[in-house]
Amino acid sequence: MNSSTEHRSGYVAIVGQPNVGKSTLLNQLVGQKISITSRRPQTTRQRIIGIVTQPDAQFVFVDTPGFQTRHGNALNRMMNRSVSRSVVDVDAVVWVIEALHLNAGDQAVLPLLQDGAPLIIAVNKIDEVGNKNELLPFMQKLEDLAHPRAIVPVSAKTGIGTEDLLNAIRGLLPERERLYGEDEITTASERTLAAELIREKLFRLLGEELPYSAMVEIEKFEIVDGLRRIHAGILVDKAGHKGIVIGKGGEKLKQIASQARTDMERLFGGKVFLEVWVKVKSGWADDAATLKRLGID
């Protein structure tokens, strides 16, 4: 890289309440799925870092769990602390809000952002807005509420506005060399990504409540002659949940494992042998030691 060319690099936290599209936005920016998504809120439980490298800038995005106020177990307290930590010592914050939907949950996030890093608001899901004329007064309301450096309408699903968002962020980053290699897209280990991809299938394939009572633990991960051999346990809170995850004749568990393995092979660029089983661990979401072992701190 020519040292005389201005280059910017920095950390950018992506925050917002559950289900506003933070993980979808990160995946769209990076160009690959590194953070799991579903239509249900509170899918993300860990901070996932995604890296976007351009000739003149490197953006290091931190996708945070959705900040939530409804449930007070140890898992959700840790997740909210993760959000609070993520907005400290970053160079910019992107607050994701669903277009035309500003509610108490969104406004609960605002105190975390005041007096911190420069703020940009990404108004997401504009592809779902029928009357685009409604966006301007909504954006003015956000301007009056939060006084951000910029407000950028985007669609994380289609990619509309994401280049505008990067351009708005670029000017807030300090002038410095790249923080990571130009071919790196995440700092998450393959072990972590494997667990998250399995957990995504729980959200996508199971009933309304069960995924919130389930977690994935990778018990063995090894690479032998290019083949990744992954052994994973799905932790559920109640004995009755075990049969739901396994399904009749084991079909549901096979479906979860098959879809997760396909995504892993696409992401890792190689063959994967995946073995998945289910075990009961009551109260895991309130067990600080278990949460720490699972990487949620």
Image (cartoon, rainbow, N blue to C red):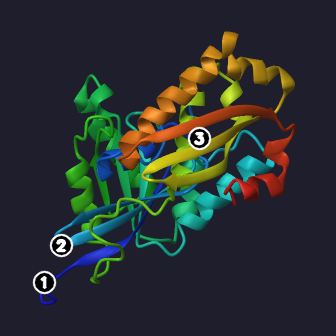
Q: Residue furthest bottom?
A: 4
Q: Identity of the amino acid at label 1?
A: Thr
Which label was assigned to residue 56?
Answer: 2
Is residue 175 found left or right of 235 in the rendered image? left
Q: Which residue does the image show at 63% across and 60% down from the upper left? A: 82
Q: Which residue does the image show at 51% across and 54% down from the upper left? A: 223
Which label was assigned to residue 126?
Answer: none
- Res 17 seen here: no
Which label was assigned to residue 104?
Answer: 3
Residue 250 locus on image (x, y percent): 66, 16
Which label was assigned to residue 5?
Answer: 1
Above-or-below relation of 73 to 6:
above
Local packing at callout 2 (Cα closer than 10 Å; few below 14, some 14-19, many 20+) is some
Q: Quadrant of the C terminus?
A: bottom right
Residue 34 locus on image (x, y percent): 43, 48
Residue 109 locus on image (x, y percent): 57, 52
| Closer to the eye: label 3 or 1 | 1
